[in-house]
Image: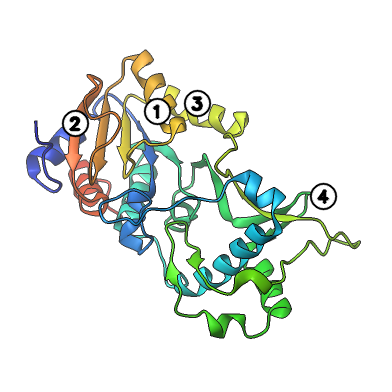
Amino acid sequence: MTPPQAGSPQTTAALARLFEAGPVAVLTGAGISTDSGIPDYRGAGSPPRTPMSIAQFMDDEAYRRRFWAGARIGSLRSSGVAPNAGHLALARLEAAGRIGGVITQNVDDLHRRGGSRTVVELHGNGSVIRCLRCGARWSRTEVLGWFDELNPGFVDRNATAELAPDGDARVSGAGDAVVPACPGRGAPCGGLLRPDVVYFGETVPPAVFTTAETLLRDAEALLLVGTSLAVNTGLRLVHRAERRGIPVAVINRGPTAVDDRDSVRVRVEGGTSETLTALVAVLGAESD
């Protein structure tokens, strides 16, 4: 059966019915951020990509050079990235009491910037950098400023590099880049800095997943937005919903891992921005 296309009155009405019993839990993936200009990992036309693993980042200085070089150039290319209509729609649904918050697999911070108050970041937040020695946390902007001081002229040489799905960039000439170290707070440190995110090879912190489970426990349905569910953490939440016997709905461009499951009551093939915007209007959650 071909999933209905986004934006039709029938599709929007079917989604709206999920909210009749009470608040809905929402799980988002990279597909909600594509309308903000961030490429998707697995969507149609996405280039093959092998994400960096935690072992590579921790054990190989060359990988860390590549990461920080890509992060610096990616920050230039993504400086205009802003929350899109999908992020804003979810914030309005939360403000109206229609959802308890957002569980996201994204690390781009766009849900918070879009006005969502309760955001469970399963894979962390890429805008936060932490020191593995002293535990200090720094903003990504601060650390990238240190990169500029250590690598004069690097930005000019790589300003046109291609933006990657995680908001970084594919750069050349990173082999000589100098990696920033933690300056410490009040005392010199020199510790290894890393983004406060869950890398491939790591697991979601138990406390974070428990918070996501709590949102799901208090919901009457689960809405999957812009995710193919290729990562096991999202599937675990679907399994939790199925054990409770609550319905699941999917909004996504392209197939997902749960399309054929009996728990999926509504399956929308299409973009998240237009679908969620229409849903907000039907549910009367538009801002004044």
Q: Is residue 136 above or below residue 17?
A: below
Circle 4 crowding by C-alpha within 10 Å: few under 14, some 14–19, many from 20: few
Mark 2 and mark 4: Cα distance apart in space:
47 Å
Mark 3 and mark 1: Cα distance apart in space:
16 Å
Q: Is residue 142 above or below residue 191?
A: below
Residue 56 or 194: which is nearer the viewer?
56
Residue, disc 2: 266
Quadrant in which residue 68 is drawn:
bottom right
Residue, disc 3: 214
Quadrant in which residue 245 is drawn:
top left
Helix, strand or loop at label 3? It is helix
Quadrant in which residue 219 is drawn:
top left
Kindly report which numbered mark, 3 or 1, lies closer to the viewer in this rendering. Answer: 1
Mark 2 and mark 3: Cα distance apart in space:
23 Å
Residue, disc 4: 133
Q: Is residue 174 above or below residue 274?
A: below
